[in-house]
């Protein structure tokens, strides 16, 4: 089954404790992206990757890191989480064309992160 | 700044009635336009997209969307709403990245 998986689905942590949210897709997609969803703000892009070893900042990259060592995986790293990073996070992937995602994106089920 | 606007936070409609969820965009060039739906505790699912050609695009679950270049709009429509259509709907525009609207909650009452 074609899918994007994220782990963990729920996470409660404390300020400053490094964490990683994993994302994996089995569709051989070139493009992958991370979003955060906050009430009244919709989805905002954190980082994206056009292909292996190619990553770039989205709209709200501060406090986050990513890597793309393999095509299928795109982990999101919070080196020192803070309460304002409490949010619902989504990973997504799509075929890629030209300068951006011209194809529909496939979303993971989401990771609800709470930082206390 | 480039943006996508969904002017209604919530749309209420009775089952069997037609529904419209509004979307306007302000982006440069000729963007690709998308609608996604989010059911509770789920990720977003693709509904439909406009690339070029016919201004009326048909998508999943009986939804369609009408592209209007002069009004820079891409409204989502369905002729007859179902209770199961109740969800959060997002409009998005692609330029060099995907820009999402803030979402519209659709509530269909029996």
Image (tube, rainbow, N blue to C red):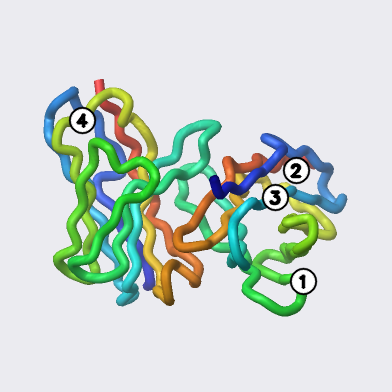
The Cα atoms of the two marked residues, 4 and 1, are separated by 45 Å
Task: Give the mark, 2 or 3, whose residue is nearer the N terminus.
Answer: 3
Residue on which disc 1 sits: B55
Residue B62 lies left or right of residue A99; in this view the side is: right
Q: Dot 2, crowdedness within 10 Å: few (<14), some or many (≥20)? A: many
- The answer to whether the residues at label 4 and label 1 have Cβ atoms under 8 Å apart is no
- Kindly report which numbered mark, 2 or 1, lies closer to the viewer in this rendering: 1
- Kindly report which numbered mark, 2 or 4, lies closer to the viewer in this rendering: 4
Q: Quadrant of residue A28?
A: bottom left
Furthest toward the top, the residue is: A116
Task: Give the mark, 2 or 1, whose residue is nearer the N terminus.
Answer: 1
The Cα atoms of the two marked residues, 3 and 1, are separated by 14 Å
* B58 relative to A35, above or below: below
Instruction: From the viewer's side, name the closer residue of B40 and B89.
Output: B89
* B10 relative to A91, above or below: above
Callout 3 and callout 1 share a chain: yes
Can the viewer see residue B36?
A: no
């Amino acid at each position: 089954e074609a899918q994007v998986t994220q782990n963990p689905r729920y996470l409660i942590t404390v300020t400053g404790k490094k964490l990683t949210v994993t994302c994996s897709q089995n569709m051989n997609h070139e493009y992958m992206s991370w979003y955060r969803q906050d009430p009244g703000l919709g989805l905002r892009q954190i980082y994206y990757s056009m292909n292996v070893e190619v990553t770039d900042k989205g709209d709200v990259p501060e406090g986050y890191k990513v890597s793309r060592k393999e095509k299928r995986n795109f982990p999101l790293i919070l080196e020192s989480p803070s309460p304002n990073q409490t949010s619902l996070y989504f990973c997504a992937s799509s075929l890629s064309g030209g300068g951006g995602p011209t194809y529909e994106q496939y979303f993971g089920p989401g990771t609800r992160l709470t930082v206390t | 700044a480039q943006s996508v606007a969904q002017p209604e936070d919530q749309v209420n409609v009775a089952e069997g009635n037609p529904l419209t969820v509004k979307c306007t965009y302000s982006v440069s060039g000729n963007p690709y336009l998308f609608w996604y739906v989010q059911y509770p505790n789920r990720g977003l699912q693709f509904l439909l997209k406009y690339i070029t050609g016919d201004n009326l695009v048909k998508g999943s679950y009986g939804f369609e969307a009408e592209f209007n270049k002069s009004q820079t709009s891409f409204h989502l429509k369905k002729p007859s709403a179902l209770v199961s259509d109740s969800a959060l709907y997002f409009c998005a525009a692609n330029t060099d990245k995907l820009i999402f609207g803030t979402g519209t909650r659709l509530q269909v009452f029996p």
